[in-house]
Image (cartoon, grey):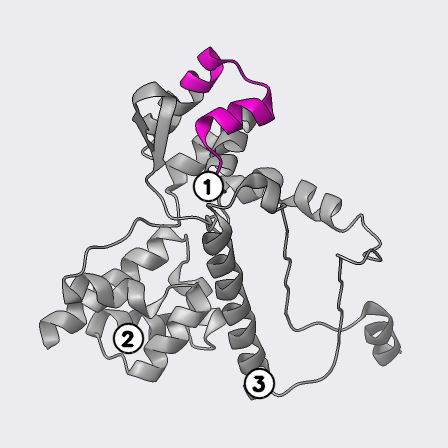
């Protein structure tokens, strides 16, 4: 049993590293000190409720940790390495190709959508194969080596390169169309209620990923690109904060 516990702890540490989550970041998310987190993970003194809490805070599924222990073949990861993200961030066309592949497009469909000839498409696929993101096959076919949708690394090169642009473009809409929605709420909550809300947001993120995976192989004519932005943090509207200081 102790051996299985150690393997789960090691899997948890690998998952945190893969997602770029430091012990300090994890400590803030689960309301513990960084030394406490280090002590828990070094000693393996981890209860099931605390393990579930860490998984929710870091986006690591319990199945992801248990599968290697049970002997079931592990699936590919949905998180890329820093080197893989760096290569994609440096080449917008390559990133566009990879994004469409992860959304179920065939290489030929990718070339058509991006206006690429066969030579350019092959160049993209070779690069992605060298990065370990796809397996290049005969006749310009390719199989993903990662699980979609992709979870971009926190503080990683993709977010550094595109996050500001994404936020600006996403929020430019008035969100008044029938297929758009924007909800904003602000209230005073207890710490317990805030944690419940964070867990619900994590569950919604998981649901979004499951739906994306379910629809990935549908024909592109049957689906459209949809973006979901969620945010939750302690916050006071600056107007009220100013009033309180007077």
Can you give x and y, in whole percent of width and height, for residue 172 in the image? 80, 48
Depth check: give the residue in front, 198 or 180. Answer: 180
What residue is shown with label 3? 191
Give the crowd class for mark 2: few <14, some 14-19, many >=20 residues within 10 Å: some
Viewport quadrant of the N terminus: bottom left
Q: Which residues are magenta?
A: 103-123
Viewport quadrant of the C terminus: bottom right
- Rendered view: 9 above or below 223: below
- Rendered view: 150 above or below 142: below
Q: Residue at x 47, y 50 (%)?
A: 149
| Residue 120 sits inside the magenta stretch | yes
Q: Earlier in the sequence, mark 1 or mark 3?
A: 1
Q: Residue at x 32, y 70 (%)?
A: 62
Magenta span: predominant SS is helix
| Residue 84 sits inside the magenta stretch | no
- Quadrant in the picture for residue 197: bottom right
- Whether residue 90 is visible, yes or no, is no
Give the crowd class for mark 3: few <14, some 14-19, many >=20 residues within 10 Å: few
Label 1 vs label 3: CA separation? Answer: 38 Å
Can you give x and y, in whole percent of width and height, for residue 101 in the image? 46, 36
- Rendered view: 237 above or below 145: below
Proximity of marks 1 and 3: CB atoms separated by less than 8 Å: no
- Rendered view: 32 above or below 10: below
What residue is shown with label 2? 40
Can you give x and y, in whole percent of width and height, for residue 40 in the image? 28, 75
Q: Secondary structure at mark 2?
A: helix
Depth check: give the residue in front, 190 or 246. Answer: 190
Left/right placement of residue 111 relative to residue 231 reads left
What residue is shown with label 1? 102
- Quadrant in the picture for residue 81: top left
């Amino acid at each position: 049993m102790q051996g299985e516990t150690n393997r789960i702890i090691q899997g948890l540490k690998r998952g945190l590293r893969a997602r770029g989550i430091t012990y300090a970041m994890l400590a803030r998310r689960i309301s513990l000190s960084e030394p406490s987190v280090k002590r828990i993970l070094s000693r393996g003194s981890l209860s099931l409720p605390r393990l579930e809490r860490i998984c929710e805070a870091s986006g690591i599924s319990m199945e992801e940790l248990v599968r290697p222990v049970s002997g079931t073949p592990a699936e590919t990861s949905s998180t890329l390495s820093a080197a893989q993200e760096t290569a994609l961030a440096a080449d917008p066309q390559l990133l566009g190709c990879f994004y469409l592949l992860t959304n179920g497009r065939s290489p030929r469909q990718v070339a058509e959508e991006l206006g690429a000839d066969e030579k350019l498409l092959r160049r993209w696929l070779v690069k992605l194969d060298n990065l370990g993101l796809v397996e290049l096959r005969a006749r310009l076919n390719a199989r993903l080596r990662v699980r979609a949708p992709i979870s971009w690394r926190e503080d990683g090169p993709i977010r550094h390169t595109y996050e500001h642009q994404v936020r600006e473009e996403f929020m430019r809409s008035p969100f008044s169309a029938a297929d758009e929605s924007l909800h904003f709420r602000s209230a005073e909550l207890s710490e317990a209620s805030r944690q419940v809300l964070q867990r619900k947001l994590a569950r919604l993120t998981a649901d979004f990923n499951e739906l994306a995976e379910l629809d990935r192989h549908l024909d592109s004519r049957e689906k459209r690109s949809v973006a979901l932005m969620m945010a939750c943090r302690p916050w006071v509207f600056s107007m009220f904060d100013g009033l309180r200081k007077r």
